[in-house]
Image (cartoon, rainbow, N blue to C red):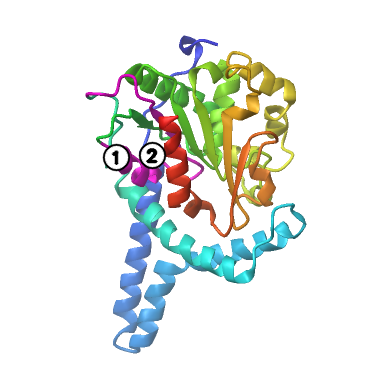
Amino acid sequence: MSQQDLPQPHPTGTEIARLQQGITLFAVLLAAMSLLWWWPRSPAMAVAGAAFWLLGYALFLGFEFVLMHHVNRHDPAPRARWPHLLQAWWAETQVAARVFAWRQPFRAQAVPDQLIGPGLRGQRGVVFIHGLLCNRGFWTPWLLRLQGSPHAFAAVSLEPAFGSIDNYVAHIDQAVAQVAQASGMPPLLVCHSMGGLAARAWLNKVQGAGRVYRVVTLGTPHHGTWLARFGQSHNGRQMRQDSDWLNSLNKPDTFASALLSAPLEGAPWQTLFTCWYSNCDNIVFPASTAILAGADNRLVHGAAHVQLAFLPEVMDATLALLRD
C-alpha cells in the first residue's frame, strides 16, 4: 500500500493533553479546597485530605503491582521479590506524576521535531511512538537528549486516543517519511507499550520493513496483557490476551508478508526487533507477553512500566543503535 492510499492523520497532540490538564487541575482544586476547609478544624486532616487528592493515584498503582505479582507467579521470567516491587512502585509513583501531570498535559510541544538543520543528512534518525493515554510529551527526556545532535527525530501523537490501533498507521507513515527525508536513511523506531503494536500494524499495512532500520519496543504487550481485560476502549480491547486483533497480528504469515521487503542482509526478520521487558511491569503482564520469539529480548529486573522507558541503561543502549 502506498502512502497516498493511507488516510491522512488528524491534527494531533491535544486530545490527551486536554484530558490530563483537566484531571490535573481538578485534583489541585480539590486539594486546595480540602486545605481551606479542614485547616481551621484540623491541620492534620487538611494535609491528609490534600495528599489524598494529589497522591491517591499511588494507591491505584499499588493495586496494579499486587495484581501483577500474583499473575506473574507462573511466568517464565524471574519473579520479583517484594522489596523490588516496593522500589518499582515508588519509582513509578514519581515518574507518573512527571509524565501525566506535567510533560503530557502542559509540555507536549516543549521540544519540537528536529527535521531541519545542518548535519542531519547521512546520520540515522529516530521516530518515537508512545503508548495508551500518552502523547509526544512522554518522550521529552529522549528529545532533549537528541536536541541539537546530528540526528533527525519526530515524535508522534496518536489520535483518536481511544480508537483502533490500525488508525495510527497514517501518523507513523508520515513521521517515518519525514525523518527518512531529513536524514536520507531509514530511521530507528522507538516504541513504548501500545506504540510497539502500532508500529507493527504500520509494518503490516505498508510492508514497511524496508523503510526502517530497527524497531525497539519498551514494555509492549506483543501478546496482550492480563490487565487489558478491564479496558473498554477499542485499542484497550485489542490489547487483551488472545484477542482476534492480536492473533491476526502475530500470525507467522502476517509477519512474513510485512517483512519480505527487508531481508536485513540475509538475517531472519526477528533481528529487526529489540524488545525490552521487565518482571515489575505493572501494566504489561505476565512479563513474557512483552517479548517476541527470536527477537533480541532484554529483561530488566525491577522496572515499572513507565519507569522502564527512562532508565539510563535502556536509553543508552537504544540510542547507541544510531551509531551502528
Residue extending farthest to the bottom is: 41
Tell me residue 284's x, y (percent): 61, 49
Other residues around mark 1 within 10 Å, as few (<14) / some (14–19) / many (≥20): some
Tell me residue 276's x, y (percent): 57, 44
Q: Is residue 27 left or right of residue 119?
A: right
Tell me residue 299's x, y (percent): 61, 49
- Magenta stretch encompasses residue 140: yes
Residue under label 1, please give it: 109
Classify residue 302 by image quadrant.
Answer: bottom right
Tell me residue 160's x, y (percent): 47, 34
Residue contact between numbered discs 1 and 2, judged by CB atoms under 8 Å: yes
Instruction: Choose between 153 and 23: the one closer to the eye.
Output: 153
Q: CA distance from mark 1 to mark 2?
A: 8 Å
Q: Is residue 252 left or right of residue 154?
A: right
Instruction: Choose between 69 and 323: the one closer to the eye.
Output: 323
Magenta residues span 118-147
Q: Residue at x 34, y 49 (%)?
A: 103
Instruction: Choose between 268 and 222: the one closer to the eye.
Output: 268
Q: Residue at x 54, y 31 (%)?
A: 198
* 236 vs 158: above or below: below
Viewport quadrant of the N terminus: top right
Looking at the rendered structure, the secondary structure element under dot 1 is loop
* 47 vs 53: above or below: below
Q: Hey, what amino acid is under mark 1?
A: Gln
- Magenta stretch encompasses residue 56: no
Q: Earlier in the sequence, mark 1 or mark 2?
A: 1
Q: Hey, what amino acid is under mark 2?
A: Arg
Residue extending farthest to the left is: 118
Count of marks overlaid on the render: 2
Residue under label 2, please give it: 136
On residue 316, which mark appears? none
